[in-house]
Image (cartoon, rainbow, N blue to C red):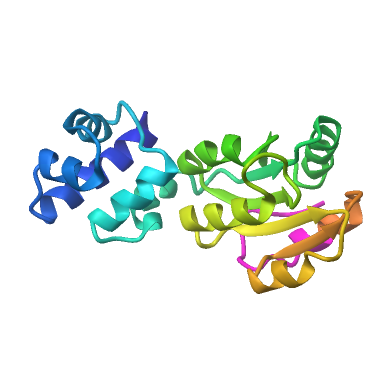
Amino acid sequence: MQKCEALANKIKDLRIARGLSQQQLAEQMFVSRSAVSMWELGTRLPDLNLLSRLAVCLQVQTHELLDGMLEEQEETLHILVAEDLPLLLRSSIRLIQEVVPQAHIIGFASGREALPYALSNRISVAFLDIELKGDMDGLELSRRLRDINPQINIIFLTAHEEYLPQAAYDHCSGYILKPLVRERVCHELNNLRFPVRGLNPE
């Protein structure tokens, strides 16, 4: 509930600061006034697409809307894993948990499943399979995650070297060729692009 309240208060404060009524903001957002009301009460969160539109209407960056909500979780180290093969997802989570036992690690089989979690939890590191099935591959998911948290560390997982130029262009933190092995995970976590407090790979 505290996470919802932090975002709700931020939306309300920014709306009032911009001199907008709930109805005026709703019209700019192309949603009902009741939707805005629920966001400000904290009973419902806007999805990522609406959050991006909301940031534009309130004249802020998307991550600024989430700052209050994310700051509450700085003491918890969250690591996200996105892999569409269940066997690989389970084994990846087990291996990463062995390397970083103090972290909260959660896995998803698609980008669409991962985004709502990233909206309400500050993800420090994300291991992403580049060739995720569905309408969002790992490269697109990484961009959406960076919209939420510009200082997230993205480590790509793939069986192919061909994506390395694109990963470098996107300034990812790491690139691991499958299969995932302990030594490689430790190397990437010890050389993150953005330092993570409390991360001590074993």
**Among the 4 quarters of the image, the one containing residue 186:** bottom right
**Is residue 129 at least partly visible in the picture?**
yes
Picture layout, residue 173 above or below residue 111: below
Front in this rendered view, residue 137 or 93: 137
Front in this rendered view, residue 163 or 145: 163
**Is residue 72 at least partly visible in the picture?**
no
* Horizontal arrangement in the rendering, residue 166 relative to residue 87 (left or right): left
Magenta region: 187-202
Picture layout, residue 24 above or below residue 153: above
Residue 131 % position (x, y): 76, 49
* Horizontal arrangement in the rendering, residue 140 relative to residue 192 (left or right): left
Residue 109 % position (x, y): 70, 34
Count of labels shown? Answer: 0
Does 192 lie within the magenta span?
Answer: yes
User: Which residue does the image show at 70% across and 42% down from the upper left?
Assistant: 82
User: Which residue does the image show at 24% across and 54% down from the upper left?
Assistant: 57
Picture layout, residue 22 above or below residue 86: below
Residue 84 % position (x, y): 76, 37
Quarter holding the N terminus is: top left
Q: Main secondary structure of the magenta part?
A: loop
Residue 173 % position (x, y): 69, 65
User: Which residue does the image show at 66% across and 37% down from the upper left?
Assistant: 110
User: Which residue does the image show at 75% across and 46% down from the upper left?
Assistant: 100
* Horizontal arrangement in the rendering, residue 177 relative to residue 156 (left or right): right
**Among the 4 quarters of the image, the one containing residue 42:** top left
Front in this rendered view, residue 180 or 100: 180
